[in-house]
Amino acid sequence: MISTLLVANRGEIACRVFRTCRDLGITTVAVHSDADAGALHVREADTAVRLPGAAPSETYLRGDLVVKAAQAAGADAVHPGYGFLSENADFARAVLAAGLTWIGPPPAAIEAMASKTRAKELMGVEPLGDVTEADLPVLVKAAAGGGGRGMRVVRDLADLPGELAAARAEAASAFGDGEVFVEPYVEGGRHVEVQIMADAHGTVWPLGTRDCSLQRRHQKVIEESPAPGLTPELVAELHAQAVRAARVTDYRGAGTVEFLVAGERAHFLEMNTRLQVEHPVTEAVFGLDLVALQIRIAEGLALEKDPPAAHGHAVEARLYAEDPAADWAPQTGTLHRIDVPGGVRLDTGYTAGDTIGVHYDAMLAKAVAHAPTRAEAVRKLAGALERAAVHGPVTNRDLLVRSLRHPEFTEGRMDTGFYDRHAAALTTSAPDPHAPLAAALADAHGRSRFGGWRNLRSQPHLKRYRTEPDGTEHEVRYHHTRQGPAADGVTVIDVRPGLVVLEVDGVRRQYRVHRYGDRVHVGTPDGDTALTPLPLLPEPAARRAPGSLLAPMPGTVVRVAEGLAEGQPVTAGQPLVWLEAMKMEHRICAPAAGTLTALHAVPGRQVEVGTLLAVVQAAAQATGQAAAQAAVPEENAS
């Protein structure tokens, strides 16, 4: 029996495993980088061991250090979580060689399926060899790892060499393995997968299906179980292929077999030899704790002949610290508050006051709703996210709500191109027009010495705010009367430091106002508006040379275009500098054709938001006219 378990991971998944360990009476051990010294998973563990450094390559990807940490803490088992070393056969062997229990499949099974090229061979699928125009579009894909890293869609044959090089570099950085391959890219397909659970006694459970078609940068955003609209015959075929994948590898534990479904045809993609981020939807539908099953199977448990029956429908949404309207750019800073209404499951690696840094994935939490029907589950999750208070960096919360309510999704007609078609419409900001007034009234009341209002009518007061992240500026005017504060077209019902009640056209609404330094969050039942107070007189803008390219996020310069030097001509859209932030590469491109007049980016240099990276003087640039910065996430480039 396992008594002490180390999780070789961080964040949300480490917290998730610890929760089950507490239920089972197992002592928990965390590992952490210097950047994660105060992280939630460290605080929740019974003991913790430091891995010196901050970058994943120095810490969470160092299997030798993780094994030493387990031995030092007296652990007798290791759970890999997902990502990092979870699909590394050498790490699994090292854990076993140290006399520890490995909570995962046999190393040989990991080795067979961890390389997507070898997995396809086992399943009778061959990758493309020499790519021709007739093969386009194609998908360049990392042979190891997952999470959308090292993946590129190529539609022009001339782009293939560059995309292969970029995919290799990113895969090597993320997984320590730069192998990539090319396969056909199926337009309009659905990403469907089957959760399996296998024991050491020959039993394999196919646990329904999951649809994970809503993806950005090839990374899943919304998942659900069961996958809607599949025929019983197609589900049976998917289950059969998933069981076959388990049997040909002598699999044990939790795994996921992924497919691209087009019409009634299923194309095998890969097998993930680990727990998936989206496993909670399967848990909800089948009433299981998959982590507990992983642990018990590692202890020798024999599964029942058949899995339990499925009940209802579950939907999961991944909450990311990112700005979907700015090409999904990851965001950093302090998370002041994260509060999702009851009735939904929230798996998170953060609490209020935690810092979201640049070194790791941008996912803050997963929200999961379960209900008797799909329509009820979708409505439940959308409503909970809409009422959630997530205060701090910009997130994709509004995008999630709109996605869940989009007709293509509610009717089950979505595919992997959903965000390619709808991202622009789904990221159009529509903040509450009275949120700035609520913020101004709450601020004025909080600053009043006596907490009251003058008996005589005063001159109008003026406050200015900027809506985040779209930058729209607002002027708010209100005045004091004998009856209290007043504003044109609005009846002020009540004002307190954290609560303002306004009535417009006979409809009364509550606005909950929270201020954190220079940021104000105003929440209503319809959503949340983030505002930055502005000075009444605009401050002089910082002067920058025309064509300045600034870092759009904190990160590390990982590459500069080969041969790039000051004085060279550049073309519009030419990639100049690559930044790595939150495990993703982002490229900074020339905003116009012209000459590179300055280059400050150096590989390995860490930069903050707004750091000057380079200057491009446009060929036809008017004096004093600033060229716009272009920042394109590497995954979206083609």
Image (cartoon, rainbow, N blue to C red):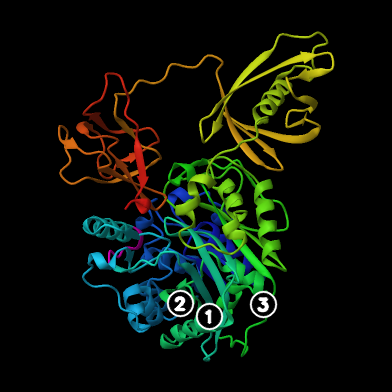
User: Secondary structure under badge 3?
Assistant: loop
- Which region is colored magenta? 174-179
Left or right, 43 with reference to 339: left
Provide the major secondary structure of the magenta segment. loop
Q: Mark 1 sits on what residue? A: 234
Residue at the (45%, 77%) spot, across then down = 266
Which structural element holds mark 2?
strand
- State the CA–CA distance, disc 1 to disc 2: 8 Å
Residue on which disc 3 sits:
310
Q: Amino acid at mark 3?
A: Ala
Q: Is residue 45 visible?
A: no
Q: Residue 597, percent across and down?
A: 20, 29
- Asked whether the residues under the numbered discs 1 and 2 touch, taking CB atoms below 8 Å apart as contact, a structural biologist would say yes
Judged from the image, the secondary structure of the residue bearing numbered disc 1 is helix
Residue 350 at least partly seen? yes
The residue identified by callout 2 is 266
- Say few, some or many: other residues with alpha carbon within 10 Å of mark 3 (under 14 / 14 to 19 / 20 or more): some
List x then y, in percent, for residue 381: 66, 56
Q: Nearer the viewer, mark 3 or mark 1?
A: 1
* Front residue of this view, candidates 230 and 633: 230
Q: Is residue 564 left or right of residue 363?
A: left
Left or right for 352, reference 49: right
In the rendered structure, which disc, 3 or 2, sits on the residue that comes first in sequence? 2
Circle 1: residue type: Leu
Which numbered disc, 3 or 1, marks the residue that appears first in the sequence?
1
